[in-house]
Image (tube, helix red, strand yellow):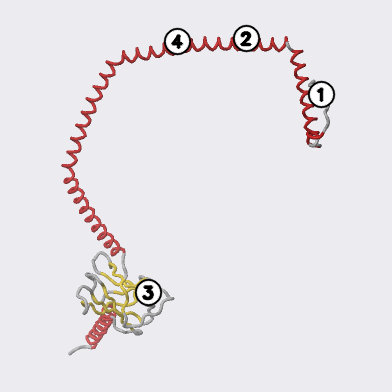
C-alpha cells in the first residue's frame, strides 16, 4: 500500500514538472499566458544561419517576443520568411527595422527591432517589418565594393601593360631616329667650329680695316667742318663790317623808301575818291620822289 507521504511526494513532483513545462512552453514557444500577442513577418534577403524557432525578439535591446516560424520565402528561394510573436503593447511603426544580432559566442542569433519613431504610423499585426542593415552588413557591402574596384583596377592595369607592349616597337624606332639626328647635329657643330677657326683671322683683318676707315673718315669730316665754320665766321664778320661802314647811306635809303611809300598811298587814296581826275583834271605840278 502506498502511504500518505508517498502520495504527497508524487503530487509535489507532478506540480513541479507541470510548472517547469509551462515555463518552458512560455519561454521557447511564446504561449499567451499573460496578455495578447501580435504576429509580424520579417523577410531577410540573406541566410539566417544561427536563428532558430523560439529565439528571442528584442525592441532596442528589450525582450518583447520570440520567433514562431522560419521558412524559405514562397516567392523567392533566395530569401527567408520569419514569423515573430510580440506583446500586443509593443510599439512597432512603419519605420521600424528588423536586424539579426549575435546572441553571444555560441553562434545563435536573435532579432532586434530598431529605428522606430512615434511620428510614423503604427504597423498593424500581420504586416511585414522591413529588414535593417547591421554593421556587419555594411562592412560586407563595402568589402564587396572594394573587391569589385580592385578587380576593375587590375583589369585596367593589364590593358595599360598590353598597350605599352604594342607601343614599345614604335618607341624604339623613335629613339633610333633621335640618336641619328643627335649624331648629325654633333658633326655639323664640328664642321662649323672648323669653318669659324679658318676664317677667324680674315674676320679680324676685315674688322680692323673697317675701324681704320672709320677713323680716317672721322678725321676728314672734323677738318672740313672746322674749315666751314671758320669761313662762315669770316663771312659774318665781313657783313657786319659793310653794314657798319655804310650805316648812314642805308638809313637814308630806308627813309626815302618810307617817303615814297607814303606818296603812293596818298595818290591811291585820291584816285579812289575821285577817279575822274585821271581824265579831266588839269595838269598838276610835277611830283618828285623824295
Above or below, 88 relative to 228: below
**Which of disc 2 and disc 4 is earlier in sequence?**
4
**Residue 54 placement (x, y as % from top left):** 26, 77
Tag on residue 95? 3
Q: Residue at x 73, y 11 (%)?
A: 246
Give the structural element (helix, strand or loop) at label 2. Answer: helix
**Which of disc 4 and disc 3 is earlier in sequence?**
3
Tag on residue 75? none
Which residue bears the numbered disc 2?
Answer: 234
Which residue bears the numbered disc 1?
Answer: 286
Q: How far, Cα to Cα, is label 1 from label 4?
A: 72 Å
Q: Residue at x 25, y 24 (%)?
A: 189
3 vs 4, front mark: 4
Residue 244 position by quadrant: top right
Q: Which quarter of the figure is the N terminus placed in?
A: bottom left
Q: Which quarter of the figure is the C terminus placed in?
A: top right
1 vs 4, front mark: 1
3 vs 1, front mark: 1
Q: How far, Cα to Cα, is label 3 from label 2?
A: 123 Å
Which residue bears the numbered disc 4?
Answer: 216
Q: Residue at x 26, y 60 (%)?
A: 145
Residues marked 3 and 4 touching at CB (< 8 Å): no
**Which of disc 2 and disc 3 is earlier in sequence?**
3
Above or below, 172 relative to 7: above
Residues marked 3 and 2 touching at CB (< 8 Å): no
Q: Residues within 10 Å of mark 1 (few under 14, many from 20)?
A: few
Q: Is residue 249 left or right of residue 13?
A: right
Q: Residue at x 19, y 51 (%)?
A: 159
Residues marked 1 and 4 touching at CB (< 8 Å): no
Q: Is residue 281 left or right of residue 180?
A: right
Give the structural element (helix, strand or loop) at label 4. Answer: helix
Amino acid at each position: 500500500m502506498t502511504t500518505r507521504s508517498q502520495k504527497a511526494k508524487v503530487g509535489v513532483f507532478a506540480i513541479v514538472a507541470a510548472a517547469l513545462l509551462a515555463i518552458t512552453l512560455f519561454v521557447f514557444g511564446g504561449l499567451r499566458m499573460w496578455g495578447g500577442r501580435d504576429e509580424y513577418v520579417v523577410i531577410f534577403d540573406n541566410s539566417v544561419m544561427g536563428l532558430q524557432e523560439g529565439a528571442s525578439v528584442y525592441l532596442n535591446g528589450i525582450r518583447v517576443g520570440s520567433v514562431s516560424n522560419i521558412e524559405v520565402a514562397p516567392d523567392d528561394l533566395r530569401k527567408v520568411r520569419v514569423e515573430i510573436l510580440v506583446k500586443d503593447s509593443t510599439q512597432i511603426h512603419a519605420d521600424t527595422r528588423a536586424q539579426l544580432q549575435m546572441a553571444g559566442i555560441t553562434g545563435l542569433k536573435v532579432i532586434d527591432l530598431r529605428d522606430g519613431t512615434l511620428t510614423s504610423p503604427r504597423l498593424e499585426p500581420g504586416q511585414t517589418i522591413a529588414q535593417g542593415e547591421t554593421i556587419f552588413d555594411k562592412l560586407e557591402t563595402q568589402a564587396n565594393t572594394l573587391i569589385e574596384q580592385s578587380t576593375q583596377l587590375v583589369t585596367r592595369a593589364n590593358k595599360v601593360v598590353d598597350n605599352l607592349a604594342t607601343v614599345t616597337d614604335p618607341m624604339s624606332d623613335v629613339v633610333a631616329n633621335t640618336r641619328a639626328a643627335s649624331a648629325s647635329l654633333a658633326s655639323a657643330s664640328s664642321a662649323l667650329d672648323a669653318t669659324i677657326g679658318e676664317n677667324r683671322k680674315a674676320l679680324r683683318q676685315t674688322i680692323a680695316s673697317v675701324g681704320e676707315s672709320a677713323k680716317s673718315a672721322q678725321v676728314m669730316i672734323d677738318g672740313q667742318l672746322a674749315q666751314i665754320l671758320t669761313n662762315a665766321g669770316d663771312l659774318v664778320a665781313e657783313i657786319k663790317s659793310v653794314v657798319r661802314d655804310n650805316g648812314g647811306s642805308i638809313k637814308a635809303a630806308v627813309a626815302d623808301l618810307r617817303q615814297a611809300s607814303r606818296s603812293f598811298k596818298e595818290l591811291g587814296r585820291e584816285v579812289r575818291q575821285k577817279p575822274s581826275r585821271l581824265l579831266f583834271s588839269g595838269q598838276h605840278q610835277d611830283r618828285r620822289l623824295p
